[in-house]
Amino acid sequence: MFNDDEALPPRDSAKTLDQLVIDAAPDGILLVDEDGTILLANPAVELITGYDSHEIIGESVNILLPEPMRARHTNMMAGFFRNPTSRRPMGMVSNLRLQRSDGTTVPVDIGLGQGRYESKSCAVVFLRDASPVRRLEEQMQFQATHDTLTGLANRWQFMQSLTQMMAMSARSQRSLGLLLLDLDDFKAINDGHGHDAGDQVLIEVARRLKGVLRAGDVLARLGGDEFTILLPEIAQPEDIGRVADKLIDVLSVPYRVNGYEVVTGASIGAAFYPSDAEDGQTLMRYADMAMYQAKAAGRNTYAIYQAAMGAKMVERIRLHDRLKKSIFSGGLELHYQPQVDTMSGQVVGVEALARWNDPELGEVPPARFIAVAESTGLILPLGDWVLETACRQLAQWVHAGRRIRMAINLSVRQFRQPGLSQRLAEWIEAYQLPAELIELEITESEAMAEPEQAQQILQELAEIGVAIALDDFGTGHSSLSYLRTLPVSRIKIDRVFIQNIPDREVDANLVKGVLSLAHTLGLEVVAEGVETPSQLHFLRENRCETYQGWLYAKAMPAADLQLLDGFALG
């Protein structure tokens, strides 16, 4: 309670305190003589300490102190009376606790004065219960160092922990593993179900991660859908791989949100201290590189940092920057692959396909730039550009007298993006298009991932008059009960089943089965990847309505397409 501060001026006479003022004071007041004996305690002291005043008056003030503090406090008290000091303002003492009558302790703030009472020199001790202030401080400290949604450590706290654990690892000469985890397609959950649903998923993700990790591991949420984990004493990559596999498995289990079942996997990047990097920022950057490598490898997997990833990351950043510039400055173009009537040989539709020939990078394959677009969010502006450009080209053909179906692929993020049907309706109106000539293609796996939500979105699109095709049919896991309720007019058999017909019996039987199923449901079929006359002959015999593939033509610019005999403008 007692400590040196500024010396009090000498006093000429003792001052008698008014007992009514003492009793009414909201703070506890103690008078303590030079021997440490309590001479007076007001009612507020009783509330703070749990002692009645008659229980402590005449006792040593040490009765109110925890045992470890008593000897030190006796010396401090003696020093106070040798050189009386003033500490009247509260809040100048930290971590001081009084011991209550029941043995518990309570944090207090104190103020000190000195005077005379009943002819004795004494100290005047003002006590205030600091519990509310300490709780507020603890709450503020927690909020400053933790994520408010999940309760996990935040980025700042994680970097502090990383610095400390790297120092510990250096002393023990043991490796430290760092994992950077990013949820796959989490934005689709926010877009499709709302941010409240996304928050529910993030809370559940945090709970699942904590359930897998060890007590000494450090888990934090860096922000958004990005989490990071410190694994002390990781000996080798195989150990960190086992942990990553467990995390991926537990996060792959579907989440139940607002009556819907949603799925999101995780891509994980790993790096080691000190073998990969000797400072925290570099270690984080290398784990980030590895995480993007995991996304490029197909997502829902993990990758461990390797030195070659640095060059790949530089290339990826350059590709992203060039692609972003091309999307907004007209550096892309659409090519169109004909969809041909199997019986007449006439072009009845085209599939719009994005192509990119960059002045600096040269011709960039679609698989390469679309993967970058999907992982960086550029897929949404890219998808909108494809939709509007295809509508503009279709309008030119229609106004020239050629009614032809325009098939346009939708990415999963574009498909679940709010406002899709409204934007498409605006383009249809702006270009004065017959809506039924536009066919939107979604993959079977996209439609079946969240079938109830997909049905709602597809119904909104169907209501503006556009047609819907189920792409890559046979590669997913369609439920017939959902398939028959979706507003789909056409299915596309994936090229993987076409390439070996008619020679491979199992593929031939599968294609026959798909055709039979589609016709039973009243759906037309487009076969993709047709490259040989024998494949076309097989499709004709089994009443497949339409095909596309190199047997007829590759995707080509609109001007070249218009020169084909089967196309011919009206």
Image (cartoon, rainbow, N blue to C red):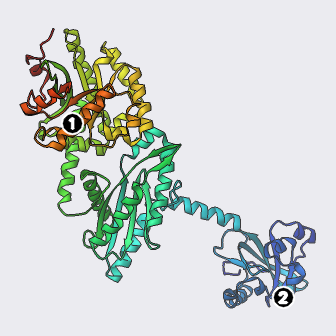
Q: Is residue 193 left or right of residue 246?
A: right
Dividing the picture into quadrants, the one containing residue 550 is top left
Neighbour tally class for label 1: few under 14, some 14-19, many 20 plus, Cα within 10 Å: many
Q: Earlier in the sequence, mark 1 or mark 2?
A: 2
Horizontal relation, residue 100 to residue 237: left or right: right
Q: Quadrant of residue 76?
A: bottom right
In the depicted structure, whether residue 182 falls above or below residue 108 = above
At label 2, which amino acid type do we have?
A: Glu
Q: Is residue 278 visible?
A: no
Where is residue 234, by image quadrant? bottom left
Q: Nearer the viewer, residue 417 or 549?
A: 549
Which residue carries the number 2 mark?
A: 59
Q: Which residue is mark 1?
A: 511
Residue 114, position as x, y percentages in the image? 79, 79
The type of residue carrying mark 1 is Val
CA–CA distance in space, label 1 to label 2: 97 Å
Q: Is residue 70 visible?
A: yes
